[in-house]
Structure formats: structure tokens, C-alpha cells
Image: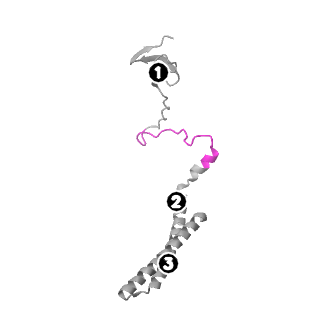
């Protein structure tokens, strides 16, 4: 983290010096034109105050990022998920639990239905027909050519 803060801090401090010089130059030019500085504050004071404000904003931004980053890391970290991942490296994070009742408090909880497998008309792997029906476990004898369904004889 310090590797990121130091370059940014240097960048902000450099900008602070630039803004301080610009504040001095603008207020000095205003003083030469009108005979008095804005709000009767000396141009050198404007420059020093600009540098100080930039230092203060830099310090506050570093503190804010440190605090906000720490809070976000605590919110993102889940003790339940971390301990379970190391213990069950090969297992799924989801366990087989019964599904909740459709209406809370009415009847026993029903188990989740089994996962359905793909059942569809797909391109015929043998190449003899356009489509062949896959029933989820294997290819059937049902085939289709030009929209006409029939049974494969072979």
C-alpha cells in the first residue's frame, strides 16, 4: 500500500507547489493592476496558503483511502466463506439442502428437484440425417430430415 501512496503523495505535493506558484502569480498580477491584493492578503501568503491547503488535502486523502480501504476489506471478507474454501477444496460450495417450503410454516420442506439434463434435437453425429434426438443419456433412433420425423432403421 505504501508503494501506491508515496508516488501519489509526491504527485499531489508537486501539484500543490504548482498551485501555490500560480496563486502567488495571479494575486501579484492583481496587486500590480489594482494596487491591492485580493482581500488585502499579500501574494506570498496566497502562495503559502495554497501549498498548505494542498498538503492538508493530500494528508486527508491518504487517511481517507486507508480508512475506507480497511472498511471495504472487512466488508468484503467473509469468515464463513474463507474457512470453508480451504477445508473443501474439491467440493462445491453449495451443499444439498432441502428447499424451503413454498409457504413458510406450512408442511415439511420439499427436496429440490433433480437437475434436468439436456434433451434436444441436435445435429446427427453419424451424419446420415439432419437431426437426431438426444434424450439426456444417449442418442435415440428418432431422426428428422427436412422437418419430417422418423425412426432410423440401422
The residue singled out by tag 1 in the image is: 133
Describe the element under mark 1 as helix, strand or loop: strand
Indicate the quadrant where residue 1 lies: bottom right
What residue appears at the point 50 percent right and 78 percent down from the top-left corner?
A: 51
Is there any visible trace of residue 124 in the rendered image? yes
When the figure is inspected, residue 101 is found, relative to residue 78, above or below; the finding is above
Range drawn in magenta: 83-106
User: Which percent across, then down, holds residue 40?
Assistant: 39, 87
Indicate the quadrant where residue 27 lies: bottom left
Number of disc labels: 3
Q: Which mark is residue 72?
A: 2
- Mark 1 neighbour density, 10 Å: few (under 14) some (14–19) many (20 or more): some
What residue appears at the point 56 percent right and 70 percent down from the top-left corner?
A: 10
Tell me the mark number nearer the camera, choosing from 3 and 1.
3
Q: Nearer the viewer, residue 53 or 139?
A: 53
| First reached walking from the N terminus: tag 3 or tag 1 | 3
| First reached walking from the N terminus: tag 2 or tag 3 | 3
Tell me the mark number nearer the camera, choosing from 1 and 2.
1
| First reached walking from the N terminus: tag 1 or tag 2 | 2
When the figure is inspected, residue 49 is found, relative to residue 104, above or below; the finding is below
Q: Nearer the viewer, residue 113 or 130?
A: 130
Q: Nearer the viewer, residue 35 or 97?
A: 35
Describe the element under mark 2 as helix, strand or loop: helix
What residue appears at the point 40 percent right and 41 percent down from the top-left corner?
A: 103
Magenta region includes residue 125: no
The residue singled out by tag 3 in the image is: 51
Is there any visible trace of residue 37 in the rendered image? no
Q: Which residue occupies the extreme top position in the image?
A: 153
User: Which percent across, then down, holds residue 21?
Assistant: 48, 78
Q: Which mark is residue 106?
A: none
Amino acid at each position: 500500500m505504501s508503494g501506491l501512496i508515496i508516488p501519489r503523495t509526491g504527485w499531489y505535493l508537486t501539484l500543490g507547489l504548482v498551485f501555490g506558484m500560480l496563486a502567488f502569480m495571479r494575486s501579484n498580477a492583481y496587486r500590480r493592476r489594482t494596487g491591492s491584493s485580493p482581500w488585502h492578503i499579500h501574494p506570498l501568503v496566497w502562495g503559502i496558503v495554497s501549498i498548505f491547503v494542498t498538503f492538508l488535502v493530500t494528508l486527508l486523502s491518504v487517511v481517507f483511502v486507508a480508512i475506507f480501504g480497511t472498511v471495504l476489506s472487512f466488508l468484503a471478507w467473509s469468515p464463513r466463506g474463507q474457512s470453508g474454501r480451504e477445508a473443501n477444496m474439491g467440493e462445491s460450495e453449495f451443499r444439498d439442502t432441502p428447499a424451503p417450503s413454498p409457504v413458510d410454516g406450512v408442511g415439511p420442506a420439499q427436496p429440490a428437484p433433480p437437475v434436468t439434463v439436456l434433451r434436444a434435437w441436435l445435429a446427427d453425429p453419424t451424419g446420415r440425417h439432419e437431426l437426431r434426438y438426444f434424450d439426456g443419456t444417449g442418442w435415440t433412433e428418432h431422426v428428422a430430415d427436412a422437418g419430417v420425423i422418423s425412426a432410423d432403421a440401422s
